Image (cartoon, grey):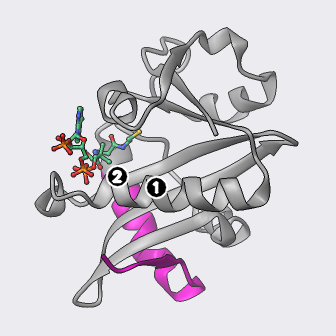
Amino acid sequence: MKIRKAKISDLKQVQKLINDFAKREQMIPRSLNELYETVRDFVIYESDGQICGVCALHIMWEDLAEIRSLAVDKSHQKTGIGINLVKRCLKEAKSLGLKKIFALTYHPDFFRKMGFVDVDKASLPQKIWGDCLRCPRFPECDENAVMLHL
Ligand SMILES: CC(C)(COP(=O)(O)OP(=O)(O)OC[C@H]1O[C@@H](n2cnc3c(N)ncnc32)[C@H](O)[C@@H]1OP(=O)(O)O)[C@@H](O)C(=O)NCCC(=O)NCCS
């Protein structure tokens, strides 16, 4: 499966993929500015020159990182792309020496299949809530928090 680190030239397509889901309140939207600043967080799946999947590993603290901005184009879902994108991020997390990876998600079963367990959102560090302020559903958050210990 063709998963690779994102390049600057990928980011307009990446933004479209993320923001199409964000318009339906399924994800937090990302600006191009933010994507340029965090390009090193992203891995992508490309097929025939089209970016069909994206996922980011965002480091939060000395032992903690977040899986975020995970999206697979509708026509490519349920073919293993999502799981392979997350696996690639987990591999990088391990190599960096991170110990805990969390995600905030409407698809907890997807993450549970990979060994993530449910945690109380309140147990996550306050700095994660900066992103939540931009969520269309804030403050009525109905996302699940899940965590994996590497
Ligand atoms: C969630 C999402 C990334 C999953 O990607 P995907 O490429 O379809 O997932 P995969 O094909 O890798 O699925 C891996 C496994 O998880 C399962 N799975 C996929 N989506 C699932 C879901 N929403 N709930 C439960 N299980 C799910 C698959 O059935 C598969 O299980 P299997 O190996 O036993 O068959 C994709 O549905 C998506 O982009 N959704 C819209 C955007 C979004 O909500 N992003 C935020 C995610 S935190």
Return the residue at label 1: 87
> What is the quadrant of the N terminus in the image?
bottom left
What distance separates the C-alpha of mark 1 from that of mark 2? 6 Å
> Considering depth in this image, is 92 or 141 the residue closer to the camera?
92
The residue sitting at 79% across, 22% down in the picture is 126
Q: Could one spot residue 67 in this view of the protein?
A: yes
Residue 75 magenta? no
Give the number of callouts: 2
In the image, residue 77 lies at what x, y percent?
18, 55
| Residue in the image at 79% along x and 52% along y | 97
Please give the residue where the numbered disc 2 appears in the rendered image. 83
The answer to whether residue 19 is seen in the rendering is: no
Specify the quarter for ligand 1.
Answer: top left
Question: Which is more toward the observer, 20 or 78?
Answer: 78
Q: Is mark 1 within 8 Å of ligand 1?
A: no
Q: Is mark 2 within 8 Å of ligand 1?
A: yes
Indicate the position of residue 48 as horizontal and vertical percent values. 22, 89
* In the depicted structure, whether residue 136 falls above or below residue 87: above
Label 2 crowd bin: few (<14), some (14–19), many (20+), radius 10 Å: some
**In the rendered structure, which segment of residues is drawn in magenta?**
1-20
- In the image, taking residue 6 as reference, residue 64 lies left or right, namely right
Residue 79 x/y as whole percent: 16, 58
Location of residue 37 with respect to 70 vertically, above or below: below
Seen from this angle, which residue lies furthest left?
75
Foreground: 91 or 21?
A: 91
Q: Amino acid at mark 2?
A: Ile
Residue at disc 1, secondary structure: helix
